[in-house]
Image (cartoon, rainbow, N blue to C red):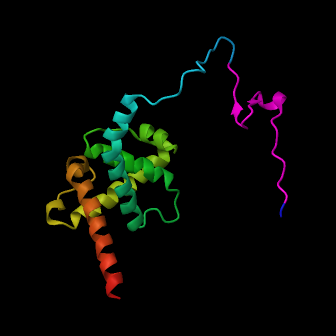
């Protein structure tokens, strides 16, 4: 039987944290701060409602990330700026225009990397839309006008591709 290593104990001088009986570290309150320790932490109803409202936007952003991966945009690159780009394009599909700085801070990326990733993703979306008859007039300039119909179309194409791949594996 292997022996277990002793658990490191916090040094009070370096960390200014106090260990409780159950092994958790608790930051002591600063001067003048009071914490209601008897009150349980609860999530407000507004936060749950907001999460429910943002679920379709997050699903569209995930579909755009799958699209970027399928088209080879993520190969050899940091995927975090593409999260920012996908959030921006998905938000545009819902009529909300977010700056690269806001989406980059939400995805914890730099705004310059987010801008480059956004341009790559948008260019690829334009190329995808141009393959269809209805998308012949899509360009980078008018992509926000087509985004409400393009983003669900991308998600549908990915699902159809997934179903087609599933059928070919069954046949083989």
Instruction: Look at the picture and state if 51 lies above or below 113.
Output: above
Vertical relation: 47 (above or below) 35: below
Which residue is at a point 42% across and 67% down the rendered structure image?
A: 72
Q: Is residue 139 visible?
A: no
Mark yes or no: residue 132 visible: yes
- Tell me residue 35's x, y (percent): 60, 18
Q: Does the magenta stretch include residue 6?
A: yes
Q: Position of residue 92 (x, y in %)?
A: 29, 44
Q: Main secondary structure of the magenta part?
A: loop
**Above or below: residue 101 compared with residue 16:** below
- Point out residue 53 in the picture as x, y percentages from the top left corner: 31, 39
- Specify the farthest residue to the left: 133
Residue 3 sits in quarter: bottom right
Dividing the image into 4 quarters, which one contains the C terminus?
bottom left
Q: Which residues fall within the magenta stretch?
A: 3-29
User: Is residue 14 shown left or right of residue 128?
Assistant: right
Tell whether 121 sits left or right of 131.
right
Q: Residue at x 70, y 23 (%)?
A: 28
| In this picture, residue 27 sits left or right of residue 117 | right
User: Is 55 or 119 nearer to us in this picture?
Assistant: 55
Front-lying residue, 113 or 18: 18
The quarter of the displayed image where residue 26 is located: top right
Residue 41 drawn at (x, y percent): 52, 28
């Amino acid at each position: 039987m292997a022996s277990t290593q002793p658990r490191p104990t916090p040094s009070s001088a370096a960390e200014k944290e106090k260990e409780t009986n159950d092994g958790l570290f608790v930051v002591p309150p600063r001067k003048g701060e009071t914490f209601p320790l008897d009150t349980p932490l609860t999530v407000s109803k507004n936060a749950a409602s907001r999460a429910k409202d943002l679920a379709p936007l997050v699903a569209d952003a995930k579909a755009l990330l799958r699209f970027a991966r399928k088209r080879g945009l993520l190969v050899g690159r940091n995927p975090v700026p593409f999260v920012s780009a996908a959030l921006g394009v998905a938000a545009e599909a819902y009529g909300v225009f977010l700056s690269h700085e806001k989406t980059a801070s939400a995805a914890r990326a730099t705004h310059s990397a987010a801008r480059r990733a956004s341009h790559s993703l948008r260019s690829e979306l334009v190329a995808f839309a141009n393959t269809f008859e209805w998308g012949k007039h899509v360009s980078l300039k008018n992509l926000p006008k087509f985004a409400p119909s393009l983003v669900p179309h991308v998600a549908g194409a990915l699902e159809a591709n997934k179903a087609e791949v599933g059928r070919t594996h069954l046949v083989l």
